[in-house]
Image (spheres, rainbow, N blue to C red):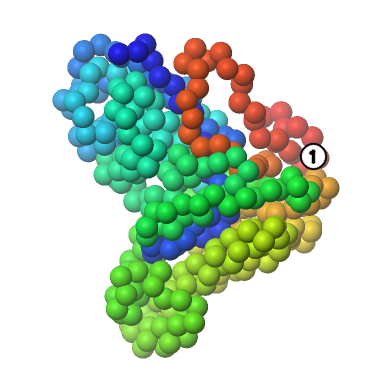
Amino acid sequence: MRESASWLAPGRVNLIGEHTDYNDGFVLPLAIEFGCRATVSPGPDGLLRFVSAQESEPVEVPVEGLAPDGVQGWAAYPAGVLWALGVDLPGLTVTVDSDVPLGAGLSSSAALTCSVAAAANDLLELGLSPRELVAVARKAENGFVGAPTGGMDQLASMLGEAGSVLFCDMRSLDVRPVRFALDDAGLALLVVDSNAPHRHADGEYAARRKACEQAASVLGVSALRDVTLDGLDEALAKLAPEPDGDVLVKRARHIVTENARVTDVVARLDAGQIREIGPLLTASHASMREDFEITVPEVDVLVEALLAAGAHGARMTGGGFGGCVIALVDNDAVAAAVRAAADAAAAHGFAAPRTFVTAPAAGAHAVDPSGAEPPRQPPVDTNASGAPDAG
Ligand code: ADP
Ligand code: MG
């Protein structure tokens, strides 16, 4: 066995397509410049050792103790990856270091699991394809950590491409890179982390999934993906008389219209009309606020402020109940937009948001285990005055 293998896997933002993944629908994420670097090396016999630069204590797990519920806390993510590989393991040491903000909706967990999966695959010479590594990383979260993620995060982190968003069909798991040439269009993609605490996100996520499954079952389809825009009115008329029909109508309407917005955005990007996706992003936010009811005042205020400051479009990204907002902004309007977001949060007494400019980055790739490669390019971090952020 080699001395070690190191891989870097990025976090992601989702340009559009929220909560459509578990409805067998469409999503359009991009890998971002923030990422997790994982190094896997042989360790003492029978022992798995997990070390994170973001955690004070290493965690040790005997190889025989590797089972779901056998590992608590953050180490469940890398331990779950090794478990999901489904092979006899030697003793291993896994060291990770990430600059993806944890729990902000930028998928630090997929960056972690994908980087560990790819590094372990490399060191142990398992020959798994990127697709198979996506499945391993997802199985680690679903089957070991117990996080019911839909699979988009891992696809974006493993298969993302610089300069493109990834059009993912979450039923077939087909993906197609779609050129997202921000620079050529003089545009910037802002990510504004509301820093709002996530409230009841797990329970609300489960409730949304349940409502979508219920709506699909009433409509006699295997998933809401099967309802098209043309058939929407008819579908809603069938849902309305059900107990909780008003809720089912709203949830289904979000999923069906959101799928249509994703394919519309792809069509415009394919036609080179980047600015024109703005209204679709904003419509997605309205749908999440009114119909799916997953936004919170902190993110609604940011979206309003960014639009008022001239953004072509803005929406919450990620599962909701806190997290980040994205906005499509002309390059020369970035500083004003950042300031507007900060001012609006302050005026409402909300936490100060943290804003950075992002662009589609490369998916998981091997890096030099010695760490001698040039430091990663950090995202341009802008504070309210548009100057580089000290933090
Ligand atoms: P998100 O994926 O949106 O950042 P999650 O709740 O899915 O949020 O995943 C965050 C969790 O992933 C953290 O609470 C932590 O347990 C784990 N995690 C991610 N990156 C690291 C890291 N570098 N070191 C230790 N734990 C990490
Ligand atoms: Mg996650």
Residue extending farthest right: 332
Q: Nearer the viewer, residue 334 or 116?
A: 116
SS at badge 1: loop
Indicate whether 323 appears above or below 70.
Answer: below
Amino acid type, mark 1: Gly
Residue 68, quarter of picture: top left
Identify the residue position indicated by label 1 in the image: 386
Residue 77 in view of the camera: no
Find residue 113 and report its horizontal and vertical position in percent.
39, 35
How crowded pointer 1 is (Cα within 10 Å; few <14, some 14-19, many 20+) is rated as some
- Give the residue displayed 75% in from the left and 47% down from the top: 184
Indicate whether 356 appears above or below 51.
Answer: below
- Give the residue displayed 59% in from the left and 35% down from the top: 33
Q: Nearer the viewer, residue 180 or 89?
A: 180
Residue extending farthest left: 64
Find residue 359 and report its horizontal and vertical position in percent.
65, 43
Q: Quadrant of the C terminus?
A: top right
Q: How many marks?
A: 1
Q: Decide if residue 86 is on the left or right side of residue 136.
A: left
Find residue 94 and report its horizontal and vertical position in percent.
36, 21
Q: Decide if residue 142 is on the left or right side of residue 230.
A: left
Indicate whether 265 appears above or below 55.
Answer: below
Q: Say if disc 1 is inside 8 Å of ligand 1.
A: no
Residue 275 in view of the camera: yes
- Give the residue displayed 45% in from the left and 82% down from the top: 231
Q: Nearer the viewer, residue 136 or 52?
A: 136
Find residue 353 and report its horizontal and vertical position in percent.
66, 45
Q: Quadrant of the N terminus?
A: top left
Residue 335, quarter of picture: top right
- Give the residue displayed 29% in from the left and 35% down from the top: 80
Residue 315, quarter of picture: bottom right
